[in-house]
Image (tube, grey):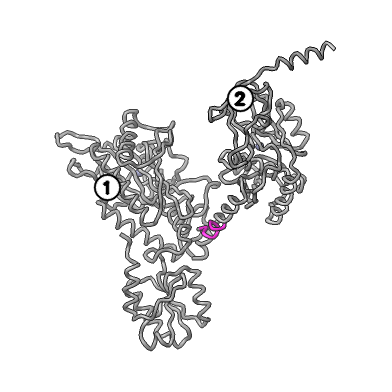
Amino acid sequence: MFHRAREGMVMTEKKLVTVTFPDGRSATYPQGTLISAVNGTQADDGSLPIAAVLNGTPVDLSTPVADDVKLEYIYPDSPQGEDIIRHSTSHIMAEAVQQLYPGAKITIGPSIENGFYYDFDYERPFTPEDLEKIEGRMREIIAANSPITRAVLSKEEALTLYKEKNEPYKVEIIREIEDDHITVYSQGSFTDLCRGPHLPSTGMARAFKLTSVAGAYWRGNEKNKMLQRIYGTAFATGEKLENHLTFLEEARKRDHRKLGKELDLFSIHDEVGAGLIIYHPKGALLRRILEDFEVREHLKRGYHLVKGPQILKVDMWQKSGHLDNYRDYMYFTEVEGQKYGLKPMNCLAHMLIYGSKIRSYRDLPLRYFELGTVHRHERAGVLHGLPRVREFTQDDAHILCTPDQLDGEIKGIIDFIAEVMKIFNFDFEMELSTRPAKSIGSDADWNRATEALTRVLQQNSLPFRIHEGEGAFYGPKIDVTLKDVLDRKWQCATIQCDFSLPERFDLSYMGPDGGRHRPVMLHRVILGSLERFLGVLIEHYAGAFPTWLAPVQAIVLTITEKHNAFAEEVFKELLSNGIRVEKDLRNESLKLKIREAQLQKIPYMLVIGDKEVASGGVSPRTRSGKDLKFMPLNDFIALIAQEARFPS
Ligand SMILES: [Zn+2]
Ligand SMILES: [Zn+2]
């Protein structure tokens, strides 16, 4: 009786708390009201929230309101909402996997851009058929609409729980958690360690698809066990999922590794080494065309072509600061008792060229350009096709100038980048990266360099973002990211200020005052790594390069053997006019020859039949299937020569 009275008293005394919404509206509720019970939760489009942000912290809808709070709902069709959907879908996938494949151990399952993954330790790799089965079971779990509940355990309780469940990876993770409050989320019989927040129930996940499976080392370390990573994608609506799947399909068709093989451009061999590219004839030619384009563009802009050696004495790398700051990425070799470092950057030889003479302010700026091949020891786990390799060539230049010329030089580089990106139809974005924790040089130098880069961007009204602490160890930089035809972003150009190398190499010039002054240096690339850029170009054009860039620009096809003699003549005539041409004189059907040439994405096909032989001309056909009318051979040569010219 006494107890009941007290309880009753507490009830009537229950405090009211004020909930304030982002629009400034507020309302009062009894303390302890669940967020899900707070009124006015429906969005304009009628959708219900799936989580909330309470005083700035994302929480579950089942969280009670304990005090006066600022409350903002998270709706499914928002970046935060989709993140929660993706993460919750990864839990649903893990539950499905454990139901279907007893013995599969769970590890971690985060949300990622456009999707999620979960890593499992299982006795064998999962197959595409497994993924279908897992998807089916996930749909059952979603249909069951089980509540997803949160619980707080002590570290001891959490350890006991996962030891009982025989989940060694979870036990390992819990052991490393410092906090004694460990949150777990349960749905049905499945419980996962997690900070949340999560969907209130499994039924709120809907539009998802499992996309692929890949090996992944536990904790990304190749010394650990290889796990099975299942990737999935999930969205707030079926329509968004469909759009994304279409995008993935398009990206798959354009994959440079797939096209690189089909177009016979390049290969990578385990027996040669990871991250090392072998260019086949058409790939090497494509690369050479790009290099010629680069040389032309640089000479036009007052750069000097230079070239340094692949290996330099280790003392040089000591002097430049690379040994202290970049050693882990470098390869070393020893010859006649002398240690050498294989160059990971092209700067040093350029410093020596500058230092080989007395320089006057009248000589500056000096712009040294090199298609410089470098070697960097990237971890095996990050190597991927052409974009991430261990040997690559940069379109690298070093500009040495007076402090007064710095702004003009930076502007010149930005214009150069914009002009080149336009040729390839790329949009681009810029980011300014500032001083990192591990760096060399004085505060004053860092400030001067950062200010110069910022000033040029601002004075030219160029939009940019700032990446604090992401600069190179020797100076701040502007990074340029290009956007390809599928709107994917790729790192290409960089402009890096360096006040340190000229100091270390004691570079100087005579000023108008007759005194010695220190030049300022810029490191810069326009396309960046040619390997990466080629990979991007292959995907951007889906292998159908514009005529000026296409390694094969035209192919001569015969209908029957009696047309071979004239076909040979046409072939030779094109070749002698500098057209990159192939011939297909095989005794195969014309249909097959055309189909193969189309798959090779050759811009022009020249079919040679009776009419062409009789009239001494060609009937060109484009790779997109357009038939041009019969024309004299010289007319075709004029037409293709026009398209084959460098674009600027
Ligand atoms: Zn979770
Ligand atoms: Zn450099």
Q: In the rendering, which numbered label is found on residue 27?
A: 2
Residue 481, given in percent of the width and then of the height, sits at 42, 47
Q: Is residue 472 above or below residue 242?
A: above
Q: Is residue 128 above or below residue 605?
A: above
Q: Residue furthest left?
A: 513
**Residue holding disc 1:** 367
Q: Is residue 220 visible?
A: no
Drawn side of residue 93 relative to residue 380, left or right:
right
Q: Is residue 228 above or below residue 618?
A: above
Q: Out of 456 and 448, give the one closest to the viewer.
A: 456
Residue 598, given in percent of the width and then of the height, sits at 49, 71
Drawn side of residue 137 relative to residue 625, left or right:
right
Residue 377, given in percent of the width and then of the height, sits at 48, 46
Q: Amino acid at mark 1?
A: Arg
* Residues drawn in magenta: 249-255
Q: What's the CA distance linking mark 1 and mark 2?
A: 66 Å
Q: Which residue is pictured at 74% across the width and 46% down the height? A: 143
